[in-house]
Image: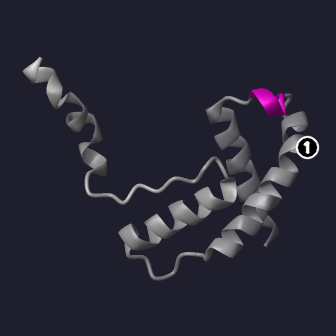
Amino acid sequence: MAGRRYRYQTFISDISGQDIQHHNGAPERAIDVVRNWLRTVSKRKHLQGPLLIKKAFSGFTASLPENCDKNGLDRNALLFVEYVGMATQWIEAELRDR
């Protein structure tokens, strides 16, 4: 058993020393947590603020039912890869319309 005692440290070593924060399943809180983590870790000086990110996420989620319909997808049964595809399409359209 001694060999198995530290087996999880091998898998989670990439996050060692990170300040893990819980978002309680709330998208707005998750946006805050991830954005602030990225701002701290990346040292980027020009990262959009959480209010702009939340506004964009709100636009994406509002467009999701229509985008799913256009692509023949069930909004409540999207695979992760399909969700990412919908997000990519939405971002590309937003950038094109600017």
The residue stretch that appears in magenta: 73-77
In front of the other: 92 or 66 = 66
38, above or below 4, in the image: below
In front of the other: 88 or 83 = 83
Task: Identify which residue is drawn at 47% across, 56% down.
Answer: 21
Residue 95 appears in the picture as rendered? no
Q: Is residue 86 left or right of residue 18?
A: right
Task: Identify which residue is drawn at 57% across, 54% down.
Answer: 23
Q: Is residue 83 left or right of residue 75?
A: left
In front of the other: 68 or 20 = 20
Q: Residue 60 at x, y = what percent?
A: 78, 55
Q: Residue 65 at x, y = what percent?
A: 88, 42
Q: Residue 56 at x, y = what percent?
A: 74, 64
- Dot 1, crowdedness within 10 Å: few (<14), some or many (≥20)? few
Residue 3 appears in the picture as rendered? yes
Q: Is residue 45 left or right of residue 73?
A: left
The quadrant of the rendering that contains the C terminus is bottom right
Q: Residue 6 at x, y = what percent?
A: 16, 31
To which residue does mark 1 refer?
66
80, above or below 40, in the image: above
The quadrant of the rendering that contains the N terminus is top left
* Secondary structure type for disc 1: helix
Q: Quadrant of residue 67?
A: top right
Q: Is residue 9 magenta?
A: no
Q: Amino acid at mark 1?
A: Glu
Q: Residue furthest bottom?
A: 45
Task: Identify which residue is drawn at 33% across, 58% down.
Answer: 18
